[in-house]
Amino acid sequence: MAGMQFWDWYGDGSTYVVDVGLACCTLEFEAASYGRTSAGIVRVEDLPAGSRVVVVISGTVTDKLTGPVVTIVSRIRAAVPSAAVVAFGACASAGGPYWDSYSVTKGIDQLVAVDAYVPGCPPPPEALATIVDELSERARV
Amino acid sequence: MSEVSRRVSAAEWHEAVAAAKTDGYDYFDWLGAVDQIGRAGEFDEGDFEVITRLVDLAAGRAVLLRTVIPRNEPRLASIVDVFAGAGWHERESGELYAIDFIGGDPRRLLLSEDYVGAPLRKDAVLGARAGIDWPGAKEPGGAPSRRRMVPPGVPEPEIWGDRNPEGEPDPEEVAQSAVGGRVRRRRR
Amino acid sequence: MSHGAIRLIEANCTSCMICARECPSWCITIDSHTEPIPDLPPGARERTTNVLDRFAIDWSLCMFCGICVEECPFDALEWASDPVSGVTTAAGLTHEIEELR
């Protein structure tokens, strides 16, 4: 498998966020990650022990793509069992505008356990920043 | 860029593409298909129109080659031996309309392996729309509907589905009904 | 442009179903019943009015196209400035009247 790009979300090595960019919602991820630090780590196994990991599935998951999505999440969870998965946007949450499509999976929770759903088509970048704050328990700080 | 459109018979398809390439249209732009069901008169040879656009970059001109193949026998010679790049386009149209491109690559391109059906055929009904209760079917005040409320994209139950007493639905009736057209049933 | 949620102005809603029927995502659910209009003048013909019981938007399907806002003849739907916030369960993505206010 090719490498993944982990973002050191707060620049302090506490929380690493990785985007599985599948469609237009990934542009909002890019906006949310703008100005943050890329960890320069491409293998989940190389992340520092005890790191918090958030996997953001942003975009439409087609039935054809379910295999790779499951593989990515499984590999991250095998290395970091506490990794949180975020369904970012309506498509990843439930199929969104493609709810009646012949080729779109109606929500990634049919494939993998999901820790948070962020609605929107697309959601604004702040919505992602907020949910990462909550998952990393920074919202209360 | 000037563009001409040329109708050819299905039997001449491969030959016409090869001839156009020799004639200078050596850049393959795209190949696609359209389900022209219900347009009798314009498309006597069948329902599926297959179109390819070839470009002569040097002369700044393009040609659309179009052919028509029957719904019950949707087969056409592949042109991958003329333009290798047509392979993906033929695979796409092949799986979305269940068209057999003879001599082409029969593998799936976009649909999952277990998908059954040809989703871009106009008589293909989206299961989710037909299977889920449409929220708009309710009447204000909750009274039972006096009209039959069928959502857009779903054919009348008499044409398609459980209430069709005659079994096998007619593709043209399904396609017409799903777009909201009133269907006058044919006598069989 | 960033968009917020869609807000229901309950008092304006007549349960006419137009938004639910126009919604391309089928994400609006409305339940209503009819009640007789009270205190009509003596001798007046009995008339009824629709009473809204449930108005729900499933944000996991909504594509924020705004057709419901545009189509509502009674201005009962409007854009809100804040987005719909993230939740931890899929069920939490459906908002009822109380959350749509």
Image (cartoon, coloured by chain):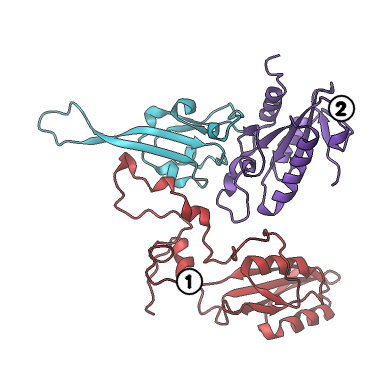
Chain colours: A purple, B red, C cyan
Circles 1 and 2, Cβ within 8 Å, touching? The answer is: no
Of the residues shown, which amino acid type is indicated by label 2?
Answer: Pro
Whole-number angstrom distance, CA of label 1 to CA of label 2: 62 Å
How packed mark 1 is, by other alpha carbons closer than 10 Å (few <14, some 14-19, many 20 or more), is: some
Q: Quadrant of residue B44?
A: bottom right
Looking at the picture, tell me which residue is in the foreground, B17 or B151: B151
Left or right of C38, for residue C43: left
Q: Quadrant of residue B87?
A: bottom right
Of the residues shown, which amino acid type is indicated by label 1?
Answer: Glu
**B33 w.r.t. A34: above or below:** below
- Label 1: chain letter: B
Looking at the picture, tell me which residue is in the foreground, A85 or A82: A82
Q: Which residue is mark 2?
A: A48
Q: Which residue is mark 1?
A: B172
**Mark whose residue sits in front, 1 or 2:** 2
Left or right of A9, for residue B7: left
Left or right of B157, for residue B115: right
**SS for tag 2?**
loop
Residue occupying image coordinates x 82% and y 71% = B84
Looking at the picture, tell me which residue is in the foreground, B40 or C100: C100
Percent from the top left, x then y, of residue C90?
A: 57, 35
Residue occupying image coordinates x 70% and y 75% = B101
